[in-house]
């Protein structure tokens, strides 16, 4: 009888499992392969969070959210350490993906993927040279021309170059060497700039076939005296850079030649003595409708720690360069971006994987979307 008790218990458990399975079988069958279609045009507050995923960089993602509704709308599953950029016509998200034949090893394949912003499904892809920079994702590692005709991909092998993809022909049409320079800051329909280690800003102009027709180099900063951060923020064809100490340098790329703007400081001499300086990853954002600049600031600036996150954001009037406000976040924020509409939000990715949300018309913190990503490096908006 002792031998039968475990057997009876097993039979009773099996019967219970069968009964439970029968109950579950009454649920409607889930249909696979169906995607929710998002509205077009996208809401100006719709946000795309580039999740670098430090613990698994061979397969990363872009998380799409509605910060007004505090809702996750979907996700793009991208290749390793993939940067992302939005088209100006709001129809496409471009990612530069790296895939390996055996997931973590084997033959490497690089592609540009064009994702539909409504279905969040890939519409087409183009194979590109296996040279794309495998770096922590940032703005202007991937960018588009103003008319969306070309996508520019920053390469690092360690020589640097830009691959040009024609989105109409859906093919690679050029690769442009930019020795000693990095990234691509687009201007107008056929130009982009790169920041060079010798302190110059190099501007390349293309024709309608993606071929180079002009190249200029303009003195921009002194690399022997200041540490200029390449992570600029754009306001139309004007870009603002900042040094690790808080010296702002702007440049207008709308003309045939770059126009270097008046430089100014984020801080007063007294604030610098007290240790205030900028810091973070994507440490600046611009709200075009308000003509204001938002900068993550550190109260105790220290060498080699300027990329650390912060809870303090200083606000500047771009016309005067004057500080007009201070905002505090409940979280340690690493990257900023502002929406471009008339009622803009400031969005900050925090180190816990959340998204901190500010109403800029009121100049105040609103809420945090927790746990929307793992290691968000960048947030982008239409």
Image (cartoon, rainbow, N blue to C red):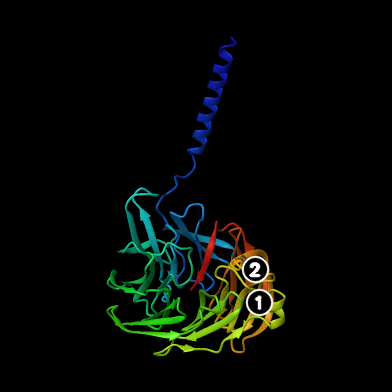
Figure quadrant of residue 351: bottom right
Q: Nearer the viewer, residue 24 or 267?
A: 267
Q: Position of residue 235 (x, y in %)?
A: 51, 82
Q: Which residue is mark 2?
A: 302
Residue 134 in sight here = yes
Label pair 2/1, CB-CB below 8 angstroms: no
- Which of the numbered marks, if any, corresponds to residue 167? none
Label 2, secondary structure: give it: loop
In the rendered image, residue 126, in percent from the top left (x then y), is placed at: 31, 64
> Looking at the image, which residue sits at the far front?
224
Picture layout, residue 206 above or below residue 4: below
To which quarter of the image does residue 90 belong? Answer: bottom left
Residue pictured at 46% horizontal, 55% vertical: 57
- The residue lying toward the viewer, choosing from 338 and 249, is 249
* Foreground of the two, 170 or 66: 170
Q: Quadrant of the N terminus?
A: top right
Q: Which residue is mark 1?
A: 314
**Dot placed on the residue nearer the N-terminal end, 2 or 1:** 2
Q: For residue 349, which quarter of the picture?
A: bottom right
Residue at 66%, 70% (x, y): give it. Answer: 301
Q: Residues within 10 Å of mark 1 (few under 14, many from 20)?
A: some
């Amino acid at each position: 009888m002792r031998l039968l008790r475990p057997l009876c218990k097993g039979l009773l458990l099996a019967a219970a499992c069968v009964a439970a399975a029968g109950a579950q079988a009454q649920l409607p069958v889930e249909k696979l392969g169906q995607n929710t279609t998002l509205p077009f045009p996208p809401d100006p507050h719709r946000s795309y969070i580039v999740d670098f995923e430090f613990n698994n960089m061979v397969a990363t993602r872009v998380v799409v959210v509605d910060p007004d509704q505090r809702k996750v709308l979907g996700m793009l599953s991208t290749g390793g350490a993939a940067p992302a950029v939005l088209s100006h016509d709001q129809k496409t998200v471009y990612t530069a993906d790296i895939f390996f034949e055996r997931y973590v090893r084997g033959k490497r394949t690089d592609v540009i993927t064009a994702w539909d912003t409504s279905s969040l499904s890939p519409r087409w892809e183009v194979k590109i040279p296996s040279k794309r920079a495998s770096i922590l994702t940032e703005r202007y590692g991937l960018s588009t021309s103003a008319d969306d005709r070309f996508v520019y991909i920053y390469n690092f092998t360690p020589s640097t170059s830009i691959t040009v993809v024609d989105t109409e022909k859906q093919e690679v049409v050029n690769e442009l060497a930019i020795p000693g320079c990095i990234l691509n800051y687009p201007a107008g329909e056929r130009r982009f700039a790169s920041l060079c280690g010798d302190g110059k800003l190099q501007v390349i102009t293309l024709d309608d076939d993606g071929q180079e027709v002009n190249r200029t180099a303009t003195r921009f900063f002194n690399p022997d005296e200041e540490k200029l951060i390449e992570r600029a923020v754009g306001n139309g064809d004007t870009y603002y850079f900042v040094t690790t100490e808080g010296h702002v340098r702007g440049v207008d790329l709308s003309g045939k030649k770059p126009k270097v703007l008046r430089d100014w400081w984020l801080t007063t001499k007294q604030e610098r003595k007290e240790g205030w300086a900028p810091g973070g990853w994507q440490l600046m954002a611009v709200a075009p409708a308000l003509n204001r600049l938002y900068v993550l600031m550190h109260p105790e600036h220290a060498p080699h720690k300027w990329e650390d996150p912060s809870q303090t954001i200083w606000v500047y009037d771009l016309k005067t360069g004057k500080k007009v406000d201070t905002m505090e976040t409940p979280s340690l924020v690493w990257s900023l971006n502002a929406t471009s509409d008339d009622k803009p939000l400031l969005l900050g990715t925090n180190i816990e994987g959340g998204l901190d949300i500010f109403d800029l018309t009121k100049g105040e913190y609103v809420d945090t979307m927790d746990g929307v990503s793992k290691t968000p490096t960048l947030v982008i908006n239409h």
